[in-house]
Amino acid sequence: MRRLLSILLFLAVPASALSACKLSECTDASCRDGVNITAYTAANLGELSPEGTIEVCRNGRCATGAFVEPGVFSLEGEIVASGTVSYVNDRRSVVEMRLGLSARELRGGDRYRIAIKDRSGRTLLDEESVANYETVHPNGPDCKPECTAASMTFPSSVTSYAASSSPAP
């Protein structure tokens, strides 16, 4: 009996050590399925508010809205989106939004379009692009949660550094 107890203890210690090791490799970060869109415009916040417009579409289903005050816009329509507008410099603004979609809704080949007009009706941006979704494990490859997401930048020809440091066309 004593020998059996020793064997059981020997087997139990490595299993618990492995379990503890596995737990220490995971973190507590969260993630959400969906799409993050960043759009750079050649307009300052004053040119967008209060009557500038924005339209965001996914596979032809759209949400439209207006910049109701500096830094804020509201969208209504067939898709759900929320976001903010930030000041970059006196000639540029950045629009950031999140489209909350479930992983089962996201399909390879999804097309997104964003159109932004200033308060005079001048088109600042009207571009479409295909999303490249990635499966994300923010806490490690063997840890939960698992999310499907894409990040898109419009216009696709700019980087965030170029958009914030280049003069407007």
Image (cartoon, grey):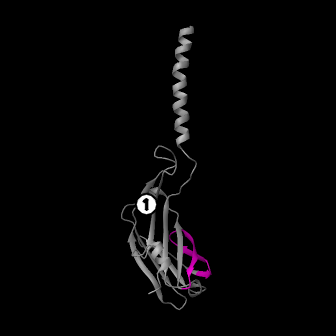
Q: Secondary structure at mark 1?
A: loop
| Residue that sits furthest to the bottom in the current view | 120
How many numbered discs? Answer: 1
* Front-most of residues 62 and 14: 14
Where is the N terminus found, in terms of image quarters? top right
- Residue 64, percent from left and from top: 52, 78
Residue drawn at 45 percent across, 71 percent down: 153
- Residue 17, percent from left and from top: 54, 30
Q: Amino acid at mark 1?
A: Leu
- Residue 150, percent from left and from top: 45, 62
Specify whether 82 is left or right of 111.
Answer: right
Quadrant assignment, res 75: bottom right
Query: Is most of the magenta stretch helix, strand or loop?
Result: strand
Quadrant assignment, res 50: bottom right
* Front-most of residues 10 and 79: 10
Q: Which residue is mark 1?
A: 106
| Residue that sits furthest to the left in the current view | 109
Quadrant assignment, res 23: top right
Give the vertical position of 157 relative to 29 (above or below): below
| In magenta stretch: residue 127 | no
Where is the C terminus found, in terms of image quarters? bottom left
Few, some or many residues within 10 Å of mark 1 (<14, 14–19, 20+) = some
| In magenta stretch: residue 74 | yes
Residue drawn at 55 percent across, 24 percent down: 13
- Residue 61, percent from left and from top: 45, 72
Q: Which residues are magenta?
A: 67-90
